[in-house]
Amino acid sequence: MADTRQIGDVILDLQNISLAFGGVKALTDISFNVRQHEIRAIIGPNGAGKSSMLNVINGVYHPQHGNIVFHGEKRREMNPTKAARQGIARTFQNIALFKGMTVLDNIMTGRNTKMRSSVLANALWWGPARNEEVAHRAKVEQVIDFLEIQHIRKTPVGRLPYGLQKRVELARALAAEPSMLLLDEPMAGMNVEEKQDMCRFILDVNDQFGTTIVLIEHDMGVVMDISDRVVVLDYGKKIGDGTPDEVKNNPEVIKAYLGTTH
Ligand SMILES: Nc1ncnc2c1ncn2[C@@H]1O[C@H](COP(=O)(O)OP(=O)(O)OP(=O)(O)O)[C@@H](O)[C@H]1O
Ligand SMILES: [Mg+2]
């Protein structure tokens, strides 16, 4: 399916990334790239360094070695807010939503980095702030329609089943209108039907908005089905990189991860 789509140039190039926490080497000399519009999967056993890699991409962790080139520019200091302003949004392995707030309000928080008016003007519901709020709401409503969650828009997130919470988290990320979306195990803990829905939404986001997607996932059926290219980590090292077929047939990958358990 993937080879009929238009994949563009490299937009994110990770070069020789190493990251350690004290004595723990989370990532060792990892290089790979992400092309415009592709679905790029990162796979590997528990503790392989997958989430750490996403945290490096969106500026939560700062590698001790290596370069990150984003849209042709070598990155200097980075933090999640700056990454968000550059169009990178993400979801988390452990859902990061405000459980007491409604679905709608949670999704609105995804617009934060796009808001220009001051907090005071917003509080007074004054002038440009008012127009801005209306525009933000309209965007959020579009995302709600897209992900088919109109029926739960006023429900506090904590009352929703897990699968729907994951979908709300995707909605919050999409509300930022990202050009690159980082998804950390978006289907973990879901039943088959929920996984199928999530797969469809990821493919639709990629297809309709042209969003580049970097995806961590343990379900190999899903990964091999929807990814354009797959990078494989094991104990913080890269052991494979290529198309799903190449990776599936890579002896080192089979030995370390795919084996007989997947
Ligand atoms: N903030 C941190 N402080 C200390 N060690 C960390 C930190 N974050 C990650 N690590 C360590 O780095 C290594 C890689 O962890 P990471 O969470 O990136 O793995 P993962 O591939 O996402 O695993 P999983 O499939 O279980 O989610 C592990 O040894 C982990 O304990
Ligand atoms: Mg992880």
Image (cartoon, rainbow, N blue to C red):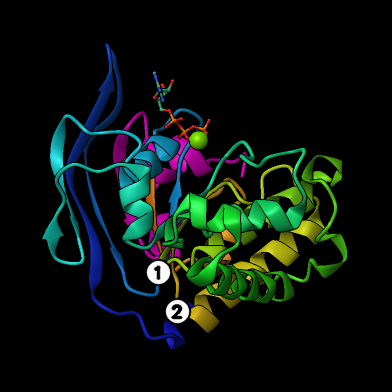
Mark 2, residues whose alpha carbon is within 10 Å: few (<14), some, or many (≥20)?
A: some
Q: Residue at x 68, y 40 (%)?
A: 98
Image quarter for residue 94? top right
Q: Decide whether residue 51 is among the magenta residues.
A: no
Q: Is disc 1 placed on a helix, strand or loop?
A: loop
Picture disc at residue 210: 2
Q: Position of residue 33 (x, y in %)?
A: 26, 59
With 30 as the anchor, is 249 left or right in this view?
right
Q: Residue at x 45, y 79 (%)?
A: 210
Picture disc at residue 179: 1
Residue at mark 2: C-beta within 8 A of ligand 2: no
With 206 as the anchor, is 36 left or right in this view?
left
Q: How many marks?
A: 2
Which segment is the magenta one?
A: 233-262
Q: Residue furthest top?
A: 23
Q: Is disc 2 placed on a helix, strand or loop?
A: loop
Q: Position of residue 144 (x, y in %)?
A: 71, 69
- Sequence-wise, the earlier of marks 2 and 1 is 1
Q: Position of residue 93 (x, y in %)?
A: 57, 39
Q: Nearer the viewer, residue 34 or 99?
A: 99
Height in image: 204 above or below 56? below
Picture disc at residue 55: none
**Quick check: marks 2 and 1 in contact, CB under 8 Å?**
yes
Q: Amino acid at mark 1?
A: Ser
Height in image: 214 above or below 47? below
Q: Position of residue 31 (x, y in %)?
A: 21, 48
Q: Nearer the viewer, residue 140 or 46?
A: 140
Q: CA distance from mark 2 to mark 1?
A: 8 Å
Residue at mark 1: C-beta within 8 A of ligand 2: no
Q: Amino acid at mark 2?
A: Gly
